[in-house]
Amino acid sequence: MSPSIITPEEVPIDSDFDLQKWLKEIEGAENLMSQVEEKVDTLHAKVDALLLEVGQPAAAVENQDTTANEDKDKPQEKEP
């Protein structure tokens, strides 16, 4: 058997408690990251929807501008 690097005297008495506490902190951090990722996905979807909504009226305004310009180019008939 190979000798152990850590001797029993070097291991603190509360090492199991510290390890459990550390594992709980990691689990809490993972849960927090999951919540953050969910919120990021939700915000990303909302931003995409807003950009799509903002982009559509711009296209409608361009169509109105084009129609108005076409009307200006047409000669207007004079009324008798």
Image (tube, rainbow, N blue to C red):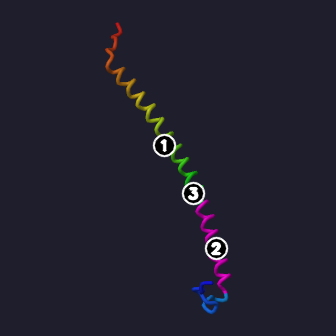
Q: Is residue 43 above or below residue 67?
A: below
* Residue that numbered label 3 is attached to: 37
Q: Quadrant of residue 8?
A: bottom right
- Alpha carbon distance from label 1 to label 2: 42 Å
Counting residues from the start of the chain, the first of labels 1 and 2 encountered is 2
Label 2, residues with CA under 10 Å away: few <14, some 14-19, many ≥20:
few
Give the residue at x 63% y 93%.
9
Q: Nearer the viewer, mark 1 or mark 3?
A: 3
User: Which residue is located at x 64 percent, y 79 percent?
Assistant: 19
Q: Provide the residue designation for mark 2.
A: 23
Instruction: Based on the picture, tell me whether residue 15 belongs to the magenta stretch.
Output: yes
Q: Main secondary structure of the magenta part?
A: helix
Front one among 16 and 34: 16
Q: Position of residue 69 (x, y in %)?
A: 35, 24
Q: Amino acid at mark 2?
A: Leu
In which quadrant is the N terminus drawn?
bottom right
Q: Secondary structure at mark 3?
A: helix
At 51% from the left and 45% from the top, the residue drawn is 48
- How far is mark 1 from mark 3, CA to CA? 21 Å
Whole-angstrom CA distance, mark 2 to mark 3, is 21 Å
Q: Amino acid at mark 3?
A: Glu
Query: Does the magenta-highlighted stretch encompass residue 80?
Result: no
Q: Which residue is mark 1?
A: 51
The stretch of residues the image draws in magenta is 14-34
